[in-house]
Image (cartoon, grey):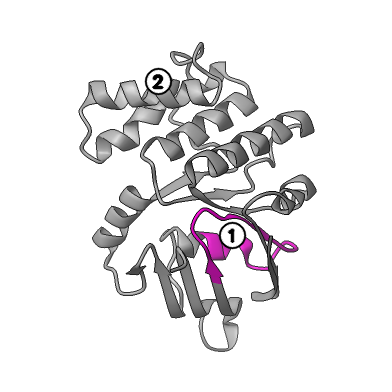
Amino acid sequence: MALIEIHDLTRCFGSGNACAWALNGIDLEIERAAWCVLEGRSGSGKTTLLNIIGTLDSPTSGSLRVAGTELGGLAAPERNGFRLRHLGFVFQAYNLMAVLDARENVAYPLQLRGWKRDAALARADEWLARVGLDGLTHRRPHELSGGQQQRVAVARALAGEPDLILADEPTANLDSHTAGSLIELMQSLNQDIGTTFVIASHDPAVIASTDGPNGHRVTLQDGKVAASECK
């Protein structure tokens, strides 16, 4: 069974004659352990689709099943719980909490899931070491470079061992060398632990990464799937 199953998914912003269709009949399946990149021009629907998969937005119509759960019928508290248990996020702007250091940023979502503070901090240390930041655990975001902050975000996303990582333009604020290192890091984690990644990006290097293991390239155009290619 695919991890993500999408059938005739639509999203309209506005109503009546003022309705703007961001998604207009999406049909798509994404397998477990896939390295999937959503590509397309600005306005093609990449971020809207990512937000709906991540339960940050709701579709206008259609069916969306993630990890065996139909998300369309969930009430807000259930969506929040599903998101906390099954999903991890890597945002373009990092979204780290300025008052917390790196390990506290990674540990915080675990504590929301009921982990004891000491256990959550120990897990944070493990993941920060895994992403190459073991010597920087007590630094706050303003004391880290953009690439280091994004690595903290990756550690935070993966520390809870979610079924799915969603990343929205994760290399947009990084120079080409740092962006390449981040892509290599995330791909190695995808291959080593089998976590599914779905990434919205217009970065040619990110798009080209789908030529590697587990690659799945989805091209969106005018709110529809124009092409879907698995390696």
CA distance separating discs 1 and 2: 31 Å
Question: Which residue appears at 26% of the width and 39% of the height?
Answer: 112
Which disc, if any, is residue 118? none
Q: Is residue 11 above or below residue 231?
A: below
Identify the mark at residue 47; answer none if there is no mark.
1
Q: Judging from the image, what secondary structure is the residue with disc 1 in?
A: helix
The reply to whether residue 99 is in sight is: no
Disc 2, SS: helix
Q: State the residue in front, 59 or 127.
A: 127
Callout 2: few (<14), some (14-19), or many (20+) C-alpha neighbours within 10 Å?
Answer: many
In the displayed structure, would residue 8 be above or below residue 47? below
Q: What residue occupies the far bottom of the structure in this picture?
A: 17
Q: Amino acid at mark 1?
A: Thr
> Residue 210 location, x and y as percent?
70, 53
Q: Position of residue 3 (x, y in %)?
A: 45, 63
Residue 173 occupies which quadrant of the picture? top right
Magenta stretch containing residue 35, yes or no?
A: yes
Image-quadrant location for residue 114: top left
Viewer-nearest of labels 1 and 2?
2
Q: Residue drawn at (66%, 39%), measured in percent from left and top?
A: 183
Q: Which segment did they paint magenta?
A: 29-50
Q: Residue at x 77, y 45 (%)?
A: 205
Q: Number of marks in the image?
A: 2
Q: Residue at x 47, y 64 (%)?
A: 52
Instruction: Please state, as top left, top right, bottom left or bottom right, where the N terminus lies in the image.
Output: bottom left
- Which residue corresponds to mark 2? 125
Residue 51 in sight here: yes
**Mark sitting earlier along the chain (1/2):** 1
Q: Is residue 200 magenta?
A: no
